[in-house]
Amino acid sequence: MIQRNEYLRRLSRAKDTRIIKIITGVRRCGKSTLLVQFQEELRASGIPDEQILSIRFDNMEAEVLLDVHALYGYLENHLAPRRRTYIFLDEIQLVPEFQKAVLSLFEHRDVDIYLTGSNAMLLSGELATLLSGRYIEIQILPLSFAEYWSFRQGEREDAWQEYFRYGGFPYLSYIKDETVRQDYLTGLYNTILLKDVVARRNVQNVMRLEDMVRFLMDSIGSLVSAKKIADTLTSSGRKTTAATVEQDLAALRDAYILYPCGRYDVQGKQHLKSLQKYYVVDLGLRRLLLGEKSRDLGHTLENVVYLELLRRGYRVNVGKIGTREIDFVAEKDGQKSYYQVAATVLDLDVFQREIRPLQEIRDNYPKHILTLDTMPIGEGGIDQKNILDWLTER
């Protein structure tokens, strides 16, 4: 079992607080495994089994608890007397009106509640309103490269080639046969698209949606708008409107397939509403849909860095400074960092293109260039680092 240590630390910090912990993320990214690992930590710390209640709602044995009243009765009857009960409800969105049971227990019993879900709609509507200020969301991503290499062992470069090609869905790290890997990714993608997008949002034109996903995955690292996407689809024979594209984009974001990255004006210190970039949750899905066409090295590396910054707890935007662009402006705890990402900057013209936007920034926050070059050289306080070193630094 691959340990997700950073997420476990975040859960441990929130343990025993009067806050509901809601763990979200794309299907098969490791949410259920994380709950199991955290329950093992509880047991290791001396919490007995009778104080731990765990239900996984996508299992047949939990079918009788898909009714909210049956669920509440079961949980109420299994609470540890005069002691805190740790409650884990996995894929809770499968229970209609589940919030009634969760809120009633949370308000009136000595419980510590952990929920998981594979769709952001879990936090929409009534639950978010009723829980305002009483929950935290912990978004889980597929394995980082550091996690993948730690499990795989061997030479770092070999692990990187596999990770870059197949992505970081945890179970893939156990599969060695390429055909089985492709079949697994295909089944996973179809399940996400059909169950978490088409069914939940009642999408009528599935072929148009699939074409839009391919377009976005082919356009990672490029600024797009709903109108541009609609025009592209219409010109290829999939007539649609910007309004429909907006709805489909929301569904893809809710299913955690695609992550938006908005724009930030560094000089004006304001977020811009027009245009944004999208990045895919896992490179294996991108290669599945685009094949070898997906080998746009620079933008693919951007995707890796963007997800890693999210894992490290940053809020990330594309930077704008005058007419130039900074790949990422990352902010955490009131501090900023700036990142440029390129396959290589050994060519002088490429180096000047990448470093110039950073040189125009007048503040003193850290500035970085990440590349695959093995002999990085900084300049003028701008740090240049090999991307594999950066991904695996502690």
Image (tube, rainbow, N blue to C red):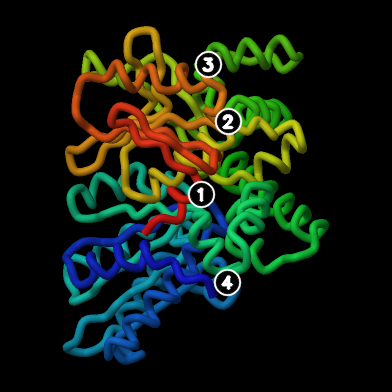
Quadrant of residue 157 within the rendered picture: bottom right
Q: Secondary structure at mark 3?
A: helix
Residue position marked by numbered label 3 in the rendering = 349
Q: Quadrant of the C terminus?
A: bottom left
Image coords of residue 135 (percent x, y): 24, 55
Ranked by sequence position, the earlier of labels 2 and 1 is 2
The label nearer to you, 3 versus 2, is 3
Disc 1 marks a residue whose amino acid type is: Leu
Residue type, label 4: Asn
Q: Tell me the residue at 65%/44% (across/down).
A: 285
Write down the residue under mark 4.
59
What SS does tag 1 mark?
Answer: helix
Disc 2 versus disc 1: nearer the observer: 1
In the image, residue 133 sits, relative to residue 170, either above or below, namely: above
**For the residues marked 1 and 3, what is the alpha-carbon distance in whole angstroms?**
23 Å
Please report whichever mark, 1 or 3, sits nearer to the chain's N-terminal start. Answer: 3
Q: Quadrant of residue 77?
A: bottom left
Residue annotated with mark 2 = 298
Residue 392, percent across and down? 45, 56
Residue 237, position in %: x, y?
A: 76, 14
Q: Residues within 10 Å of mark 2 (few under 14, many from 20)?
A: some
Seen from the viewer's position, the closer of residues 231 and 102 is: 231
Alpha-carbon span between mark 1 and mark 4: 39 Å
What's the CA distance linking mark 3 and mark 2? 16 Å
Residue 20 seen anywhere in this rendered image of the structure: yes
Q: Is residue 266 left or right of residue 318?
A: left
Separation of residues labelled 2 and 1 (CA atoms): 14 Å
Query: Badge 1 local density, few (<14 within 10 Å), some, or many (20+)?
Result: some
